[in-house]
Amino acid sequence: MTMKPSLILNRALFFFLCGFGFYSAFSFLTLHFAREKIKVHLDANIDAIAIGHSHVECGLDDKHFPGLKNFGKSGEALYYGCLKAAKIVQTYPQVKTVFVELSANQMDAHMKDWICDEEHFQRAMKSYFHLLSSSAKLDFFLSFPLNYCTSHLIAEKRIIGLLLGDRSKCNTNELEWGGYVAHEKNITDSLQMMKSNSSRFLQPYPPNLTAILDLIKFCGDRGVKVVLIRVPVHESETDLFELSFQDILRENFSDLEFYDYRKMYLPDSCFLDREHLNADGARIFADRFYQDWMRSKGN
C-alpha cells in the first residue's frame, strides 16, 4: 500500500519538529549550565581586573601590579570585553575595580569588523557565546545567519567539552579570555620613520560605546569602580582620532577617573613596535601605574 504524499510530508514535518524541539531544549539547558558552571579561576587576592585589546594585553605586566589580573586580549572589541568583565564581577564579589583600556580606535566605526567579521566573531563565540543575551543572538542571526549558525555549533561543542571536563582547572588560557603576554623583542627599526601628524574624525561606534556604559552601570549597582586607562605608545605614533576622542570622553565619561599614560615617555628599547610595549616596557609601566593608583587611594 502506497502512502499518500500528504501523509509522508506530515510525518517528515513531525519528525523535523520533534528533532528541532529536542535540539532547542538541549541547547537551552547547555547554555543554562554554562552560565552557572563555566567561570575563569581567580585567586582570592585579586581585587581588580583590566580589559582591553592588544595594548593592555602586552602592555600591563600584572605581576608588577599586586591585586590585579590582566584580561586584555589582542584584537578584542570592548563589546566582548565588557561581557567578560561583567561575568567576572558577578562571580567574584572581591573584585572592586575594573580598569577599561579605552583606546581611541575602540570607539571608531571600523570596530564593526572586530565584532562581526567571520574571524573575530567565531573566535569571540568560542569564549563568550554563553554570555550573550537572547536579543544579541537574534540580532547576529538576522545580520549574518550562516556565520552565526556555524559559530553557534562551534561554541556549543566547546561549551560541552568544558562542562564535561574538570572545571576547577578553568583558566584564561583554556577559556581564551586573554591575559598578559610578554614580548622580549625590541623592534627599533620600525620606529625610525616618523608618521605624519594627520588627524581624522572619529565616528563613534554604538555597540562598543553602549557596552562600556552598560558595564559602568552594572558595576556601579554592585559597588564596583570602573576606571579608564590608556597604555603608553611610542612618541612617533600618530594621534589620528585624538580631538574627537576627547569629545567622546567629555560627553560620556566625564565623571570617571582616567589614567592616561599614552604620552608617558619610555625609551625605544621598551617598545615592541609603535603601538605596543615589550616586556621591559610593560614592567616599567605597571610599576608606575601601581604607584599612581596607590597614591590615589591614600596608601
Image: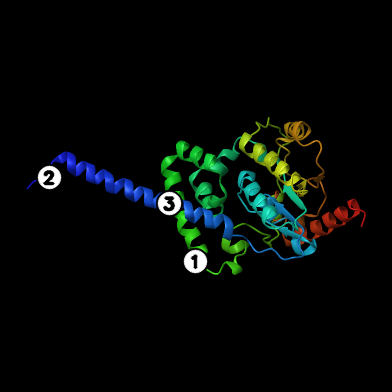
| Residue drawn 78% across the image and 53% down it | 96
Q: Residues within 10 Å of mark 3 (few under 14, many from 20)?
A: few
Q: Nearer the viewer, residue 61 or 79?
A: 79
| Residue drawn 83% across the image and 57% down it | 290
Which mark is in front, 2 or 1? Answer: 2
Q: Is residue 79 left or right of residue 266?
A: left
* Residue 25: image tag: 3
The part of the image, by quadrant, that contains residue 48 is bottom right
SS class of the residue under badge 1? Answer: helix
Identify the residue under disc 1.
Answer: 164
Q: Nearer the viewer, residue 255 or 278?
A: 255
Q: Nearer the viewer, residue 291 or 216?
A: 216
SS class of the residue under badge 3? Answer: helix
Task: Report the amino acid beneath label 3.
Answer: Ala
Task: Report the amino acid beneath label 1.
Answer: Leu
Q: Residues within 10 Å of mark 2 (few under 14, many from 20)?
A: few
SS class of the residue under badge 2? Answer: loop
Identify the residue under disc 2.
Answer: 3
- Residue 71: where, in percent of width, then height? 67, 56
